[in-house]
Image: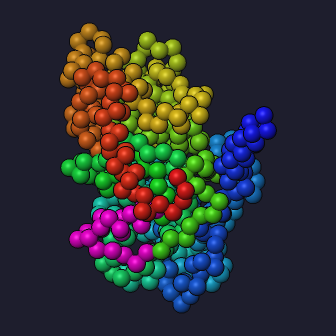
Amino acid sequence: MNRIYTLIAVVALSLTAAFSLSARGVILGDEQFSSYLPELQGKKVAVFSNKSGVVGDKVLKGKGLPLDGPKKFGPHLVDVLLRKKVNVSVIFSPEHGFRADADAGEHVSSSIDPQTGVEIVSLYGNSGRPSAEDAEKFDVLLVDIQDVGLRFYTYYVTMYRLMDFCADYGRKVIVLDRPNPNGFYVDGPILDMDYKSGVGALPIPVVHGMTLGELALMINGEGWLKDGKKCQLSVVTCRNYTHQTKYQLIMPPSPNLKTMRAVYLYPSTCLFEGTVVSLGRGTDHPFEMYGSPDMKLFSYRFMPKSMPGAKKPDYQDEWCYGVNLSESDVDRICARGIDLNYIINAFSMLTSFPGASTHEGILPDGRHFFGKKPYFDKLMGNSWVRELIMQGLAAEDIKVRWQPDVEKFKAQRRPYLLYEE
C-alpha cells in the first residue's frame, strides 16, 4: 500500500512540475539584458519586430487574450533599447506592419515610427530582403517577434530572408527567443519545394513545433541559406519553458488571431484561405468559424463586415451559413492537431448539390472549391492532400500518409532543439 501511495505521489509531483513551468512564468529572451546588451555597445542595431515585441510579455492592465477589455502592456523592446542608449538605427517589419494592424497580404510602405523617430523598412512582399543600402544602416540584427509555429505564418519567412541577407553582408543575428504557443506538437506534411512560396519557404511540416530561435539554428545547421552559407547567429533562450508549456499570448500576434482558441485552430481553419469558404474574417471570431452563402443546410450563420484587419473580407455584408467553433473545447482542439474534417465537411456539402462534381471539385455555379490555381496546395505544401480530399478519403486516412514526414522531421530537428520535448 505504501508503494502505491509513493507512486501516486511521484506521478502527482511530476504533473505538478510539468504544469508549474507555466504557473511560475516563462522568462523571455528579451528580458535577459546581460546576455545581449554587451554585444550592442558601440554598434548600429536593427530590430526585426512588430508590436508583439513587448519585453517580458508584461500586461500592466487587464489580462491577455482574448481582447475582452482595456489593456496596457509593458514597454516595447525598441523603447527599452533607446532608453538604455542603444543606437537603434532601423526597424524591419513583417507582414501586417510594425504595429501589426494591416490586413493579411496588404502592402505596407516603409516609414518613420512616429513614437521613436526610427526608420521602419517594410519587408513583406517583393523580395522580402533589405536593399544593399540598408546593409550600411546596421551592424547587428535583433529578432524579437511572436510567432505561432506554422509554415504558412510568414514571420519566419522574413527572418529566414534576413538571415540570408546578414550572411551576405557579414552582419550578426541575435534571436531573442519567445515560446511557440503551438510548440507542443508536430503535424502535417513536409513542404514539397516545388510548392515553395511566400507562405512556405522551408522543407518543414505545416506545424513545426519549434521556436524561432530553434528554427534559426536549424536554418543555419541544415544549410538552408542560399549556397549553403551561414550567418553569425546566437540565441538568447527562454527560461522556465519546455515544448509542453501551453504558453498564453498577451496580444494578437497578427490582427485576426484574437484568442488562444483561434491560435490553436489556425493550423486547420487557415486552410480555408485556399477555398471558396469564409473562415470568419470580418467577424469577432476569425479562424473560429467557417461557412459560405451556399451552405444553407447549417443553421448557424454569420455576416462578414469590413473592419480593421479585414477591410474587404470574403462575402462582405452577405449571410454565410456554416459551423461555429468559437465555443469548441480547447483541449480537444489541441489533441487533434491539424483537423481536415472541417475542410472535408464543407467540400462534401458544397459538391453534393445537383450540378456539382465531387471528383473535380466543381460547384453548381461552375466555381472550383479549391480555385483554378489552388492556393490550398501552397498552404499544404503539395497537391496530393487536395487530390485525396477530392477522392473522398477520410481525414484520419490522409493524416496517416504524412506521419512518416512528421517522424522524419522530429529526428532531423532534434539537434537544434533548445528546450525539453
Residue at image location 33% in from the left, 71% down from the top: 164
| Quadrant where the image shows the N terminus | top right
Indicate left or right for 404 with 325 as reference.
left
Magenta residues span 214-233
Q: Residue furthest bottom?
A: 42
Q: Quick check: 140 above or below 407?
A: below
The answer to whether residue 1 shows anywhere in this view is: yes
Which of the two residues, 117 or 363, is positioned nearer the viewer here? 363
Indicate left or right for 114 with 153 as reference.
right
Residue at image location 69% in from the left, 42% down from the top: 11
Total numbered circles: 0
Asked whether residue 312 is drawn in magenta, I would say no
Here the colouring is rainbow
Residue at image location 30% in from the left, 78% down from the top: 168
Q: Position of residue 54 (x, y in %)?
A: 62, 63
Q: On the image, which quarter does residue 223 sit in?
A: bottom left
Q: Quick check: 269 above or below 320?
A: below
The answer to whether residue 152 shows anywhere in this view is: no
Q: Position of residue 71 (x, y in %)?
A: 71, 51
Indicate left or right for 180 with 154 as reference.
right
Indicate left or right for 309 with 151 as reference.
right
Which of the two residues, 351 or 27, is positioned nearer the viewer here? 27
Which of the two residues, 409 or 389, is positioned nearer the viewer here? 409
Q: Position of residue 23 (x, y in %)?
A: 72, 51
Asked whether residue 226 is drawn in magenta, I would say yes
Q: Position of residue 275 (x, y in %)?
A: 33, 32
Q: Quick check: 169 above or below 280?
A: below
Q: On the image, which quarter does residue 176 sit in?
A: bottom right
Residue at image location 53% in from the left, 75% down from the top: 118
Which of the two residues, 345 or 304, is positioned nearer the viewer here? 345
Q: Residue furthest top?
A: 354
